[in-house]
Image (cartoon, rainbow, N blue to C red):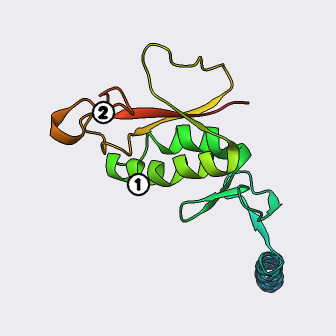
Amino acid sequence: MQLALDHSALEHEISHVNKSCASFDHLLLETVTRMEKDIADLVGALALFGIGRCSQCRQFFRSDPGVFFDYGKSVCYQCIPNWWSSLSVQISVSDREAIEAKLAPWLRKHHQAQVIKDGPGAPSIHEGDLQIVTTCNECRGSGKILEGERCRFCNGVGTVRVVVPR
């Protein structure tokens, strides 16, 4: 009889502990949910003041021209080399070309990038320079211009290098 009573008391105690844990878990979930909402509200408020967040390094920056490249997500200039080398091999050729078509002019406009055609007389590219190979805008990657002549902007290759010296 004593054993049955102890077993019943033990079950009651376990039930009480489980209810306490469930109540604690519920309070914890509510607290975390409220904190996540508050943080999202803070990030939204920062955006109203012209401050954006890099999707790669998660740092906040003033959203001045040239700080972020926007391809649907914002990437800060410092993250561009690693982001691009990683992303460019994961996406389709057409998606890559579409992003390159926006990235190259952005680099030229805000970061003094130079368009370099490969071949004799091309300036040297130093280790550490940010560079991407992109479709030539003049011939649209065909390597030919009017009447089948070789494109002088890309030397007929169809691509050019966009280089930002460091």
Residue drawn at x 44%, y 22% is 118
- Whether residue 129 is visible: yes
Query: Is the residue under label 2 in contact with that under label 1 (CB below 8 Å)?
Result: no
Query: Between 7 and 65, which is closer to the camera in this rendering?
Result: 65
Farthest residue toward the top?
120
Disc 1 residue type (three-letter)? Ala
Q: Secondary structure at mark 1?
A: helix
Q: Position of residue 50 (x, y in %)?
A: 80, 73
Inter-mark Cα distance, 1 to 2: 21 Å
Q: Going from the N terminus, do you reach mark 1 or mark 2 first?
A: 1
Q: Is residue 41 left or right of residue 95?
A: right
Name the spot of residue 99 as percent of width and height, x first. 46, 53
Residue 150 in the image, given as x and y percentages of width and height? 25, 29
Name the foreground residue: 54 vs 166: 166
Above/below status of 149 relative to 126: below
Q: What residue lies at 67% left-to-right and 52% top-to-bottom?
A: 56
Q: Amino acid at mark 2?
A: Cys
The label on residue 151 is 2
* Along the viewing direction, whichever of 35 and 110 lies nearer the viewer: 110
Q: Is residue 163 left or right of residue 51?
A: left
Q: Secondary structure at mark 2?
A: loop
Which residue has dot 1 on it? 98
